[in-house]
Image (cartoon, grey):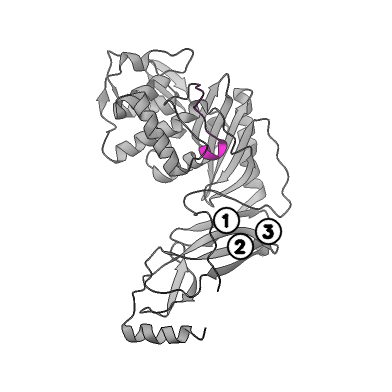
Amino acid sequence: MRVLLSILLLLCFPVQAALLAPVPALTLDAKAYLLYDFSGNQILLNQNGHERMEPASLTKLMTAYLIFSAINQNKLALTQAVTPSAGAILPQGEESRMFLETIKPVTIAELLRGLIVQSGNDAARVLAETLDGSEALFAERMNKEAARLGMKNTHFVNATGMPQAQHYSSAYDMAILAGAIVRDFPDHYPLYSIREFQYNSITQPNRNRLLWMDPFVDGLKTGHTNSAGFCLVASAKRGQRRLISVVLGTNSDVLRATESQKLLNYGFQFFDSVPLYAKDQAVSSIRIWKGTEKMLPVGFRQDTAISIPHGQQAELKAVVETAHPLIAPISVGQRVGTLKLTLSGKPYMEYPLVALEPVALANVFSRGWDSIRLLFQ
């Protein structure tokens, strides 16, 4: 009797692909870097990706994520005007600002642009206070959301990314967060491609140089402090394929952009995206016992693609493995098996298979007959 293998859930955490075919090595001038294939949910390259580091203003990805969520839940509205508190707009040392004023109400829509385009720390603090009353309470919300998303090497103390001892994240966790923004908030994501924003008669450009350098790049966020160095989480989409790069701890504004560009180009050039199965397409039909149906179609609840080294598609093979015996009742979406992929005869990736149709429990007679037949299996 085969036992169903335990693997990472496809929709929750990126999976590290086992690179078996010859792929050129890539070394970047950064403390940590990671390349995430969002479309295939795979990590294509990982250098120190799980190491805890100072995220600087990449923190604002989580700040924005929570505000997007609050808007979608009708807790906040884009047209809602708020009056900044004196404490929220008081500069905390040398920091990026939106240049808010206590005498001038500002809308949530403007604050989001100040947060994302201008990287304003004052905008981050005002948004935090608007949602939770204080930045400290907002940080608690940030940590709860980080835990829910599976960001295991992340802890937030503030909404801005200002350096503090217990404020840290990792390249891997930032990839998870960036992917969650793309996936969960497609209506808000275009904010990350805005090249400049004017507020209070001050126009500031987006610090993400790749928005000018690469026509396929449409986000996401830069970060910098003296201790963190220059950081960038970027995303590019070519056709239906989206890659997300994370580069932490470079030595200059220019370098974080050029190293990120190298990383994205590496993924598009040396890996092919191969469609596996469409949403609700049957991968296979498997025998089910004691149910109203004898065969159960299994597959994926979303379109599924995989990245493989360029030119290796013919070497990709798939095997379906299921638990035996599979007993009714079964609900739609229930995990019932594993799709195991090999490349050139060696293990490459594994994906969970789910039931595409429900199967109810059969009547007493049918269940009894199946019980007898199972004795001889």
Q: Nearer the viewer, mark 2 or mark 3?
A: 2
Of the residues under marks 3 and 1, which one precedes in the sequence? 1
Of the residues under marks 2 and 3, which one precedes in the sequence? 3
What is the tally of numbered marks visible in this picture?
A: 3
Check disc 2 and report its element: helix, strand or loop: strand
> Front-most of 145 and 184?
145
Q: Amino acid at mark 2?
A: Leu
Residue 305 seen in this snapshot: yes
Question: Which disc is residue 343 wearing?
Answer: none
> Front-most of 361 and 285?
361
Question: Which disc is residue 312 wearing?
Answer: 3
What residue lies at 36% left-to-right and 15% top-to-bottom?
89
Q: CA distance from mark 1 to mark 2?
A: 10 Å
Q: Which region of the structure is painted magenta?
A: 162-174
Q: Nearer the viewer, mark 1 or mark 2?
A: 2
Q: Amino acid at mark 3?
A: Gln
Q: Position of residue 240 (x, y in %)?
A: 51, 51
Residue under label 1, please give it: 306
Q: Amino acid at mark 1?
A: Ile
Of the residues under marks 1 and 2, which one precedes in the sequence? 1
